[in-house]
Image (cartoon, coloured by chain):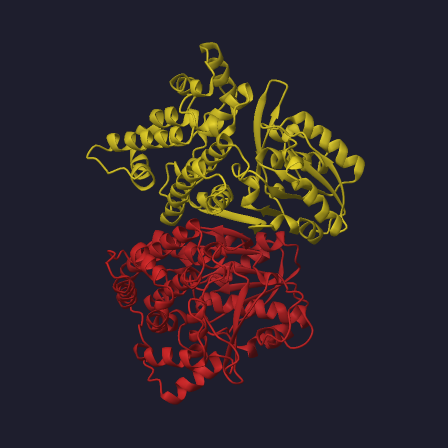
Chain colours: A yellow, B red
Amino acid sequence: MENFNYYTPTKVVFGKGTEEKTGELVREQGCTKVLVHYGSGSVKKSGLLDRIFRSLDEAEIAYVSLGGVVPNPRLSLVYEGIELCRREGVDFILAVGGGSVIDSAKAIGYGTANEGDVWDFYARKRQAEACIPVGVVLTISAAGSEMSDSSVITNEEGWLKRGYSSELSRPKFAVMNPELTMTLPAYQTASGCVDIMMHTMERYFNQNDNMELTDGISEHLLRTVMKSAKILMEEPDNYSARAEVMWAGSLSHNGLTGCGTGGGDWACHQLEHELGGMFDVAHGAGLAAVWGSWARYVMDAHPKRFVQFAVNVMGVQPREDDTVTALKGIEEMEKFYRAVGMPVCVKDMGIELTEEQIVILARKCSFFGSRTIGCIKKLEEQDIAQIYRDAR
Amino acid sequence: MENFNYYTPTKVVFGKGTEEKTGELVREQGCTKVLVHYGSGSVKKSGLLDRIFRSLDEAEIAYVSLGGVVPNPRLSLVYEGIELCRREGVDFILAVGGGSVIDSAKAIGYGTANEGDVWDFYARKRQAEACIPVGVVLTISAAGSEMSDSSVITNEEGWLKRGYSSELSRPKFAVMNPELTMTLPAYQTASGCVDIMMHTMERYFNQNDNMELTDGISEHLLRTVMKSAKILMEEPDNYSARAEVMWAGSLSHNGLTGCGTGGGDWACHQLEHELGGMFDVAHGAGLAAVWGSWARYVMDAHPKRFVQFAVNVMGVQPREDDTVTALKGIEEMEKFYRAVGMPVCVKDMGIELTEEQIVILARKCSFFGSRTIGCIKKLEEQDIAQIYRDAR
């Protein structure tokens, strides 16, 4: 069992009507000028943004706003946000949205609080020394960015999608009203569920002797999300299922499911980051599209873990041959993906990967041959290319 | 499902050798003078205290120390600590020990940072407005005080044992090395395991529609602690089992197992507090001694929950009659208590409760008839007396 740190200082305010507390929560932080950051017009149309503004007004908090965040949030908007924050003397960023908006807010927070180009942090050239505090009103259960220390930004120059993690950016508070997610289309709901599951599975699959406590929490979280996702395909307004998924989203990525695991694999995230950079696919869908091919490629490196997964998570009856049990678990997961409208290969997303594209993806994913990804099996450039090929 | 807040800002540093980081962790807090607070001589004899002092020296942190905390920590030592902190200009309290030491440290923190008598907070006369920051090096897995917002102090005048909760006192960091718990006697290890389980069970038993996610986490935590406790009765040096129990202790009381439960029952804790005040029994043992009588007395008020507990936690095969299943679950739990040397009634702790004592306990537990305890079933003074009677 590996030593670990666990640090989740985000104050969670969970449940119906909690967005009304936003102003009060910002005031608690002692800040004077807020950037309200959001994505498309949906938070405007739904009236949520107006409710947030009213709550800030009531708490006598000044604010400016910046919308326009897109999935796979762009560096150009981050630059725009940094400029706005500096000009306006912003000292708190309120992200109203899902992972993309929160990640964009964190990047603006780094960029405003540090000198030089914010992309340096994502390009791993240097470490941030500060970050403007970020708060969240969550509208999409998926990324877990509302309690996590990480953010992922896409640089349009070269379409590089890169993540950066630092304790500095953990949100100060997260307002989570499951009702706010009820209007999400089924595809986005399912994609979010896959994202949540993958944050747990990336940690679950590793080469260490995991803590039993962590394993069981992860396995239960996965089962609960799968059950809730299926309910939500039929009843998008089911409050309990929305709440289970929303809370699972935070727990899957706040560190809890990683305690004692030594970090986890994360190869699927790296594989998807390149796909997402090249094709702008929904993150969860992209993860589902590569997972099966990744799992079959690496399972021989730690069959026992794949057997445990098959039995405890997917409810597979253990067979005499571990390989058969493990493969059955992978199949069952793919069956679940299909049941909620998710892809199990890249073609399912309407993309026909060419061999040329595969070579480029593998080049970029391996940082031009300079790194391996994953820990269940360390994957080099040619392994990565083969997984993309298998996932076509 | 109830709305909830979740706030666990304690930085956990978990694993082998982590006590070496204590000085560095205190320095991160920006404090200049530390009170090192501890209990009996065991942390001296083991050399732990010297290692902590060395770590503080290396970090160039000044300190004074105060030992002598006993189980059911006393108000008189808290007063002594407050005086010492004021005299020495202490701005950080480092608790080296288990729940009693941490609770005493929190009380000293309140008393030093606020005017007037610190007992006022525990007597629910007023709220604390500040608390000197507290850090922990944990040596006993039990109370969960290392991540919780609560503390319990015993006032020798009238032997009143009272708890006080405030976000102000959540420890800034908790150093958790499971190896430090290996020298605990079996009885104390088992008592700690019961305490951990009860922190989860108090929240698990309630009248709301719980979150499935929370329920499953709680059930798995309970199963893991029971399994680990049995291992530790045979192999006290088993690192994995010590680690499972230690981490379960924190998770059981940091708020995670209460998410969406609306708070929980907590009657057993109130029942035990009076026993502990009168007889100075080990907290976990006292909880085990009253739990079965409490469970049988209240189960009719929510049989489904007791059935779920019996099936999911105790592995009982569900019977046609819910009462039979529920009772079987209670019996199985008592069987577990016995298996790890814990009492299932007060007599098992060598105490013969008289009717006169029962009346006094019930009087004090009901705050002289002015409150009910519990939520599965609201218990009045005469109910409380009857449970003590059943638990004789």
State left or right for residue B54 relative to residue A106.
Answer: left
The quarter of the displayed image where residue A72 is located: top right
**Residue A131 visible in the shown view:** no
Q: Position of residue B167 (x, y in %)?
A: 59, 61
Residue B92 visible in the picture: yes
Give the vertical position of A114 relative to A255 (above or below): above
Of residues A238 and B108, which is closer to you in this image? Answer: A238
Residue A328 in the image: state x and y as whole percent.
28, 31
Residue B301 pos. (x, y %): 38, 67
Q: Toward which corner of the image does residue A122 lie, by quadrant?
A: top right
Question: Looking at the image, which residue sits at the far left?
Answer: A320
Disc tally is 0
Which residue corresponds to the image point at 31% horizontal and 42% vertical from the top-left? A312
* B91 left or right of B267 in image: right
| Residue B46, x across and y down, in percent | 43, 64
- Residue lying furthest bottom in this view? B356
Most foreground residue, B136 or B210: B210
Left or right? Give the position of B283 relative to B352.
right
User: Nearest the camera: B391 or A256?
Assistant: B391
Which of the 4 image quarters holds residue B336? bottom left
Quadrant of the image containing the C terminus of chain B? bottom left
Left or right of B153: which side holds B288? left
Q: Nearer the viewer, residue B88 or A388?
A: A388
